[in-house]
Image (spheres, helix red, strand yellow):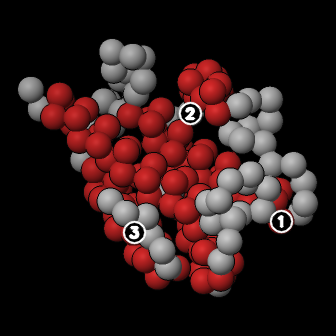
Protein backbone atom coordinates (compact mmCIF):
# COMPACT_ATOMS: atom_id res chain seq x y z
CA UNK A 1 0.00 0.00 0.00
CA UNK A 2 1.54 3.33 -0.99
CA UNK A 3 2.04 5.91 1.74
CA UNK A 4 -0.39 8.81 2.01
CA UNK A 5 0.78 11.98 0.29
CA UNK A 6 -1.81 14.46 1.53
CA UNK A 7 -3.40 15.43 4.81
CA UNK A 8 -6.79 14.21 3.57
CA UNK A 9 -5.36 10.82 2.56
CA UNK A 10 -3.60 10.48 5.90
CA UNK A 11 -6.72 11.28 7.91
CA UNK A 12 -8.77 8.86 5.80
CA UNK A 13 -6.30 6.01 6.22
CA UNK A 14 -6.05 6.67 9.97
CA UNK A 15 -9.82 6.45 10.35
CA UNK A 16 -10.13 3.42 8.06
CA UNK A 17 -7.44 1.36 9.79
CA UNK A 18 -8.58 2.40 13.27
CA UNK A 19 -12.16 1.38 12.45
CA UNK A 20 -10.99 -2.05 11.26
CA UNK A 21 -8.92 -2.51 14.40
CA UNK A 22 -11.66 -1.44 16.82
CA UNK A 23 -14.12 -3.77 15.08
CA UNK A 24 -11.72 -6.64 15.70
CA UNK A 25 -11.09 -5.54 19.28
CA UNK A 26 -14.83 -5.74 19.90
CA UNK A 27 -14.73 -9.41 18.83
CA UNK A 28 -12.02 -10.34 21.36
CA UNK A 29 -13.44 -12.37 24.23
CA UNK A 30 -12.20 -10.51 27.33
CA UNK A 31 -10.93 -13.73 28.90
CA UNK A 32 -8.76 -14.32 25.83
CA UNK A 33 -7.24 -10.84 25.58
CA UNK A 34 -4.64 -11.63 28.23
CA UNK A 35 -3.71 -15.10 26.98
CA UNK A 36 -0.15 -15.10 25.64
CA UNK A 37 0.71 -16.55 22.26
CA UNK A 38 3.69 -18.84 21.70
CA UNK A 39 6.04 -15.85 22.03
CA UNK A 40 4.50 -14.72 25.31
CA UNK A 41 2.63 -11.78 23.75
CA UNK A 42 -1.07 -11.20 24.39
CA UNK A 43 -3.67 -9.25 22.45
CA UNK A 44 -3.66 -6.74 25.31
CA UNK A 45 0.10 -6.35 24.87
CA UNK A 46 -0.29 -5.61 21.16
CA UNK A 47 -3.02 -3.01 21.72
CA UNK A 48 -1.14 -1.29 24.56
CA UNK A 49 2.01 -1.27 22.39
CA UNK A 50 0.19 0.48 19.54
CA UNK A 51 -1.10 3.18 21.88
CA UNK A 52 2.40 3.74 23.22
CA UNK A 53 3.90 4.17 19.74
CA UNK A 54 1.43 6.88 18.78
CA UNK A 55 2.55 8.79 21.86
CA UNK A 56 6.22 8.18 20.99
CA UNK A 57 5.60 9.81 17.61
CA UNK A 58 3.88 12.82 19.20
CA UNK A 59 6.87 13.18 21.53
CA UNK A 60 9.34 12.96 18.63
CA UNK A 61 7.47 15.68 16.80
CA UNK A 62 7.30 17.90 19.89
CA UNK A 63 11.00 17.46 20.64
CA UNK A 64 11.95 18.25 17.04
CA UNK A 65 9.81 21.38 17.01
CA UNK A 66 11.42 22.53 20.26
CA UNK A 67 14.89 22.07 18.75
CA UNK A 68 15.67 19.32 21.24
CA UNK A 69 17.38 16.07 20.40
CA UNK A 70 14.90 13.51 19.13
CA UNK A 71 15.54 10.04 20.54
CA UNK A 72 14.57 7.26 18.16
CA UNK A 73 12.93 5.09 19.20
CA UNK A 74 13.42 6.33 22.79
CA UNK A 75 16.16 7.80 24.94
CA UNK A 76 18.91 5.25 25.47
CA UNK A 77 17.79 3.04 22.57
CA UNK A 78 18.69 2.77 18.89
CA UNK A 79 16.54 1.27 16.16
CA UNK A 80 18.72 -1.84 16.41
CA UNK A 81 17.52 -2.14 20.03
CA UNK A 82 13.86 -2.27 19.03
CA UNK A 83 13.25 -5.86 20.15
CA UNK A 84 14.74 -5.09 23.54
CA UNK A 85 12.75 -1.85 23.83
CA UNK A 86 9.49 -3.59 22.95
CA UNK A 87 10.17 -6.43 25.40
CA UNK A 88 10.87 -3.91 28.16
CA UNK A 89 7.70 -2.03 27.21
CA UNK A 90 5.69 -5.25 27.65
CA UNK A 91 7.20 -5.62 31.13
CA UNK A 92 6.27 -2.00 31.99
CA UNK A 93 2.73 -2.59 30.70
CA UNK A 94 2.35 -6.07 32.24
CA UNK A 95 -0.08 -4.92 34.93
CA UNK A 96 -2.31 -3.09 32.47
CA UNK A 97 -5.85 -4.45 32.29
CA UNK A 98 -7.55 -5.21 28.95
CA UNK A 99 -10.02 -2.36 29.35
CA UNK A 100 -7.17 0.04 30.15
CA UNK A 101 -5.30 -1.01 27.00
CA UNK A 102 -8.40 -0.26 24.94
CA UNK A 103 -8.80 3.14 26.61
CA UNK A 104 -5.10 3.86 25.97
CA UNK A 105 -5.52 3.07 22.28
CA UNK A 106 -8.64 5.22 22.03
CA UNK A 107 -6.87 8.13 23.73
CA UNK A 108 -3.77 7.80 21.56
CA UNK A 109 -5.89 7.71 18.42
CA UNK A 110 -7.81 10.79 19.53
CA UNK A 111 -4.54 12.64 20.21
CA UNK A 112 -3.22 11.62 16.78
CA UNK A 113 -6.39 12.78 15.03
CA UNK A 114 -6.37 16.08 16.92
CA UNK A 115 -2.72 16.55 15.92
CA UNK A 116 -3.50 15.86 12.25
CA UNK A 117 -6.53 18.14 12.27
CA UNK A 118 -4.49 21.12 13.46
CA UNK A 119 -1.62 20.51 11.01
CA UNK A 120 -1.48 22.04 7.54
CA UNK A 121 -0.70 20.10 4.39
CA UNK A 122 2.70 21.80 4.26
CA UNK A 123 3.47 21.00 7.90
CA UNK A 124 2.71 17.33 7.25
CA UNK A 125 4.30 16.90 3.82
CA UNK A 126 6.35 20.00 3.03
CA UNK A 127 9.69 18.60 4.14
CA UNK A 128 11.43 16.30 6.59
CA UNK A 129 10.21 16.18 10.18
CA UNK A 130 12.41 18.32 12.41
CA UNK A 131 14.94 16.23 14.29
CA UNK A 132 14.21 13.04 12.35
CA UNK A 133 17.60 12.74 10.65
CA UNK A 134 16.01 11.35 7.49
CA UNK A 135 13.84 12.54 4.59
CA UNK A 136 10.49 11.39 5.95
CA UNK A 137 7.95 14.18 6.33
CA UNK A 138 5.90 14.44 9.50
CA UNK A 139 2.92 12.85 7.76
CA UNK A 140 4.91 9.74 6.94
CA UNK A 141 6.05 9.41 10.56
CA UNK A 142 2.42 9.84 11.68
CA UNK A 143 1.33 7.12 9.26
CA UNK A 144 4.00 4.74 10.53
CA UNK A 145 2.98 5.32 14.17
CA UNK A 146 -0.79 5.26 13.57
CA UNK A 147 -2.42 3.44 10.67
CA UNK A 148 0.54 1.24 9.82
CA UNK A 149 0.61 0.04 13.42
CA UNK A 150 -3.17 -0.34 13.41
CA UNK A 151 -2.90 -2.49 10.28
CA UNK A 152 -0.28 -4.79 11.79
CA UNK A 153 -2.31 -5.08 15.01
CA UNK A 154 -5.38 -6.05 12.96
CA UNK A 155 -3.36 -8.73 11.21
CA UNK A 156 -2.22 -10.08 14.58
CA UNK A 157 -5.76 -10.02 16.00
CA UNK A 158 -7.16 -11.74 12.91
CA UNK A 159 -4.72 -14.62 13.38
CA UNK A 160 -5.37 -14.86 17.11
CA UNK A 161 -9.16 -14.74 16.67
CA UNK A 162 -8.97 -17.60 14.15
CA UNK A 163 -7.07 -19.59 16.75
CA UNK A 164 -9.77 -18.96 19.35
CA UNK A 165 -12.57 -20.33 17.19
CA UNK A 166 -10.88 -23.71 16.76
Residue carrying label 1: 65
Pointer 1 local density, CA inside 10 Å: few below 14, some 14–19, many at least 20: some
State the image coordinates of residue 146 (x, y, percent, origin top left): 50, 57
- Up the image or down, 26 lies above or below 38; here it is below
- Could you tell me which secondary element the residue under label 1 belongs to? helix
Dot 3: within a 10 Å radius of its alpha carbon, few (fewer than 14), some, or many (20 or more) residues? some
Check contact, mark 2 vs mark 1: CB within 8 A: no
> Which residue does the image show at 55% across and 53% down from the upper left?
145
Quadrant in which residue 131 is drawn: bottom right
Q: Nearer the viewer, mark 3 or mark 2?
A: 3
x and y percentages locating residue 160 in the rendered image: 25, 32
Q: Earlier in the sequence, mark 2 or mark 1?
A: 1
Residue 13 — which label?
3
In percent of width and height, residue 43 lies at 38, 34
Q: Nearer the viewer, residue 142 or 117?
A: 142
Identify the disc placed on residue 32: none
Q: Is residue 88 left or right of residue 163?
A: right
Q: CA distance from mark 2 to mark 1?
A: 31 Å
Marker count (numbered): 3
Of 119 and 47, the residue lying toward us: 119
The answer to whether residue 24 is left or right of residue 80 is left
Q: Quadrant of the C terminus?
A: top left
- Residue shown at 69%/65% (left/top)? 128
> Which residue is at the front of the view, 151 or 30?
151
- The quadrant in which the N terminus is found is bottom left
Please determine whether, in this image, residue 53 is positioned above or below residue 160: below
**On screen, residue 76 above or below 10:** above
Residue drawn at point x = 63 percent, y = 66 percent? 137
In three-dimensional space, the C-alpha distance between marks 3 and 2, rounded to whole angstroms, equals: 28 Å
The disc at residue 96 is 2
Judge whether 107 appears above or below 35 on screen.
Answer: below
Q: Is residue 14 left or right of residue 139?
A: left
Amino acid sequence: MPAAATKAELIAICEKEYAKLTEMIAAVPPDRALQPDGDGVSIKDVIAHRAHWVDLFLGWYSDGQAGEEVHFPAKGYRWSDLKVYNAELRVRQAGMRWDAAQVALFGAHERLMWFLAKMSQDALYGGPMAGARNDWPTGRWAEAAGPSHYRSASKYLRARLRGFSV
